[in-house]
Structure formats: C-alpha cells, structure tokens
Image (tube, rainbow, N blue to C red):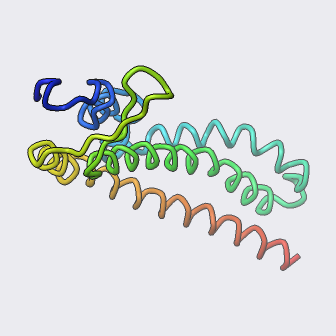
Amino acid sequence: MESPSVCPVPLEQRPVNEFRELTESQYFRWATLRGWDFFKPLAIAFGASFVISAPTSAASYPIAEAPLEWFLIAAAGACLIPFLMLIRLYLGWNYIRSRLLDTKIFYEESGWYDGQTWEKTPDFLNQDKLIVTYEVQPVVKHLQQAIVFAGGVLFGLIIASIGWAFLD
C-alpha cells in the first residue's frame, strides 16, 4: 500500500481496505460462496420465516379448509426474509464496487464536519479496477442472479395465491 503522504485518505476509509473489511465480515463473505454453501443460509431463513408466516397465513386460510391457499401465502411470506437478505448483501457489495470505481474518494479526517475529496492516482485507480473486475463484479453478478431468482419465486407465489383466490 502507498504511504499516507501519497494518499491522504485515512486507512479505514480507503476503498481497498473497506473491501477487505467486507470480505472479512461473516455476513458479506457469505456472498462469495457457491452452491449449497450459498443457499443453505437462505434455506434456513426460509424455514425460520415459514414458522412465523404459517400461523399468520392460517388466520386467513385455515389449513383444513384451504390447504393450497394457506401454503402459497405462507411460502410467499417466508420468502420475504431471504429476499431482503439478498438485497442487503447486494447493497453492501455494490457500495464497495462503486467506491472502488469512483475516481474521487470522499473521506473525513476527524469528524463529520471536515469532509474532503481526493482524486485517485492512476496506480490506485488501476488497482481498484482490478479488484472490481476479478473479485467484486463476479459476486455482484451472482447476487443479481440470486435476487432475480428469489424475486421471481416470490412474485410467482404471490401471483399464484391471488390467482387461486380468484378461482374460488
């Protein structure tokens, strides 16, 4: 890393260090996993959410009288938490992506009242672009795909439950 005299931005506010913090965070590191390791926390969140949404759904659609409607509404409600988890992951990774790609860095030296801007040198900018290309962008793309899938499932469940309700 360059010396502080070359880059006046405090170490903890430099995008490359913010990226390292993100990858060391247990929650955000989860987005770098693939396969079952990635989907396992979503499945657990869905299961836990289903435990909450099932009784709520049963208040509107008793299981004995309308089992399909009950299940569709309960599953749609249970999809909300995993969907929001994916959105939070995406927002964190996209924020780091934008900080790394920005040519100027906004930072604060000692408090909220002394914000400054530093224009990245070509070396800093190239280093940050490489990090985005090879480490951040694949994660952002993976999260976008997961959000589209989860959103499709959620939307499908909502549409199915509305459609089924109109059939009755």
- Residue at image point 38% right, 43% down: 38
Residue 65, given in percent of the width and then of the height, sits at 90, 59
Quadrant where the N terminus is found in the figure: top left
Q: Indicate left or right for 32 with 157 as reference.
A: left
* Most foreground residue, 10 or 85: 10
Residue farthest top in this picture: 110
Which of the 4 image quarters holds residue 152? Answer: bottom right
Q: Indicate left or right for 103 with 61 as reference.
A: left
- Residue at image point 41% right, 59% down: 144
Is the residue 7 above or below the residue 156 in the image? above
Which of the 4 image quarters holds residue 12? Answer: top left
Q: Indicate left or right for 66 with 1 as reference.
A: right
- Residue at image point 57% right, 63% down: 153
Residue 162, given in percent of the width and then of the height, sits at 78, 71
Is the residue 103 above or below the residue 153 in the image? above
Which of the 4 image quarters holds residue 40? Answer: top left
Residue 77, given in percent of the width and then of the height, sits at 71, 51
Residue farthest bottom in this picture: 167
* Most foreground residue, 87 or 96: 96
- Residue at image point 72% right, 60% down: 72
